[in-house]
Image (cartoon, rainbow, N blue to C red):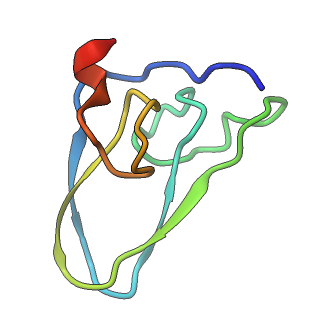
């Protein structure tokens, strides 16, 4: 598998709504970061589904190296 593109070295703060589904970009190529826009076509990557359990603010990873996908775990600080 190839390495993802680092879209940004900081997380994206997003207000999510309970019951809504979000598709997190794993490849880093999406122009709609942190969400998928289909740019992964032809790569080894597929988007990851995230379903919000409650209304809240979450921080989606944009460096694509998190161990807590799709949420940020701070690994961007070491890149």
Give coordinates of residue 58: x percent, y percent. 21, 59
Q: Quadrant of residue 51?
A: bottom left
Give coordinates of residue 30: x percent, y percent. 54, 33
Depth check, front residue: 2 or 43? 2
Give coordinates of residue 7: x percent, y percent. 42, 23
Whether residue 41 is situated above or below residue 8 in the rendered picture = below
Residue 12 shown left or right of residue 50 in the figure: left
Q: Quadrant of residue 9?
A: top left
Residue 45 shown left or right of residue 58 in the figure: right
Q: Quadrant of the C terminus?
A: top left
The number of numbered discs placed on residues in the rendered structure image is 0
Whether residue 47 is situated above or below residue 20 in the rendered picture = above
Depth check, front residue: 12 or 64? 64
Q: Quadrant of the N terminus?
A: top right
Q: Quadrant of residue 32?
A: top left
Q: Residue drawn 45% across and 19% down?
A: 6
């Amino acid at each position: 598998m190839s390495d993802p593109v680092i879209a940004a070295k900081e997380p994206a703060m997003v207000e999510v709504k309970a019951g809504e589904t979000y598709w997190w970009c794993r490849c880093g190529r999406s122009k709609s970061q942190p969400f998928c826009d289909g740019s992964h076509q032809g790569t080894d990557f597929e988007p990851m589904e995230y379903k919000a359990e409650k209304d809240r603010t979450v921080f989606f990873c944009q460096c694509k190296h998190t161990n807590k996908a799709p949420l940020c775990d701070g690994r961007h600080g070491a890149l």
